[in-house]
Image (spheres, helix red, strand yellow):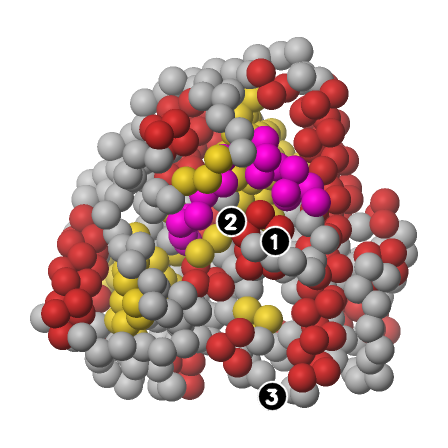
Amino acid sequence: MKAIMVMFDSLNRRLMQPYGGDWVHTPNFARLAERAVTFENAFIGSMPCMPARRELHTGRYNFLHRSWGPLEPFDDSMPQILDENGVHSHIVTDHQHYWEDGGATYHTRFTTHEFVRGQEGDPWKGLVDAGVARDSNRYMRTRLQDQVNRTYLKEESLMPQAQTFAQGIEFMRANAAADNWYLQIETFDPHEPFFTQPGWKEQYPHEYDGDFGDWPPYARVSESAEDVQHMRYEYAALMSMCDHYLGTVLDVMDELNLWDDTMLIVNTDHGFLLGEHDWWAKMRMPWYNELANIPLFVWDPRAGISGERRGSLVQTIDLPATVLEYFAIEGPLDMQGAPLRDAIVSDAPVREAALYGIHGGHVNVNDGRHVYMRAAAREANEPLYNYTLMATHMRHRFGVGELSDIELQTPFEFTKDCPTMKIASQPLPGRWLADFETLLFDLDADPGQLNPIEDARIEAEMIDKLVGLMRANDAPSEQYERLGLV
């Protein structure tokens, strides 16, 4: 038995042909949908990048207990469990967050791993005169470094995505005759910036004389309609490039007859806003369905089901359980996700409701009909703590000021009798939350989530579901206080 996961970052599924997109060229995603099962109600869990990847390892939510950070000593890791049971796990990725402080323990859980450099502001090539070291603003340093990196990526074969897929296919060819392996091909694309070579841009010709570029801000849309459409074309070009390289994997699956004994999962960590709800990107707004309702395709050779769609409510936390079950390995007790085998075969229900969010933001619950987004009850968004033994942010360790008054927290249900540090969190800036109160949407009547409703009965039902899922995840007591649920 073999398994492959092809993971993209920031796929907006509404632009993809299998999900109703009608102007972005994604023929290989359409080809995949004809070969696999397409999930209609797949949802995120913990956001953004590395919190989502922690869920891919552990099969449980991250966001209620901590923000961005490495895997914890008490965490179960799906790739490591495979390795410990004689299944070779391998990752090839250009996702640069894996080699920052906040992602440093993920790739080492795999049996083997390969990195491709150069995405976004990856501190890769050094050109002193570019002034990276002279700029103390992290945002500007990232953009300066990105401009340096691009000078070394002048043709498509040098692009990180192209190299990532080439190395993944190299693994597939080298091990096609072997048994018991799991391969994760993971590219940062189509995450911003939407950098492509001219051939992809030419698929979306348009007259444009502005200077918006290919890197949208994490902010409200303040640009012109012409700027917005330009940025959508830039994203579309990169999505079409992603579609092409997905096709290279499908071609090798065909050529080597891997469909007979190889599971294929194609997924993303979250979506991306391209002006919907008058916002760019993610993080600074509620997790609308353009962000939360993600594409997911699964081919399971045991079932052999192609070209069908499933409505079961599934989440990222289900994927590690699915891989372990496929290899006949019992999942650990702390893994809360469920294997998707029965959902693939018969659309069997997986859960009544899905919980998702970001540390310090709205806590969301979705039951397939309604979405309830519970906001902080106080403008200060407190109390809020990180519970961790790996005191690391995205690109740097916790500062001594943050650690000066830490407390020792008694173990949670999933920390295997290990106490953790309890560290006061730096809450999301007030401007990220102040514009948004608690929101309730009826997806049947309002699939675009444009008109929030007020219904005390439905809200009470959704609160019960939200609280039940928080309790099942052993949420810290102050989360209920922060949300006004006590």
In terms of sequence position, does the residue under pointer 1 or pointer 2 come before the other?
1
Q: Residue at x 31, y 55 (%)?
A: 368
Query: Label 2: how many residues lie within 10 Å, few (<14), some (14-19) or many (20+)?
Result: many
Do the CB atoms of the residues marked 1 and 2 lie less than 8 Å apart?
Answer: yes
Residue at mark 3? 222
Q: Residue at x 35, y 30 (%)?
A: 346
What is the span of residues highlighted in magenta in the rendered image? 27-44
| Circle 3 or circle 1, nearest the eye | 1
Up the image or down, 68 lies above or below 327; here it is below
Judged from the image, the secondary structure of the residue bearing numbered disc 2 is: loop
| Circle 2 or circle 3, nearest the eye | 2
Q: Is 371 within the magenta?
A: no
Viewer-proximal residue, 261 or 59? 261
Q: Residue at x 53, y 80 (%)?
A: 278
Up the image or down, 233 lies above or below 196; here it is below
Residue 1 rendering spot, x and y as whole percentages: 52, 16
Residue at mark 1? 16
> Can the viewer see residue 149 in this picture?
no
Q: CA distance from mark 2 to mark 3?
A: 28 Å
Residue at mark 2? 295
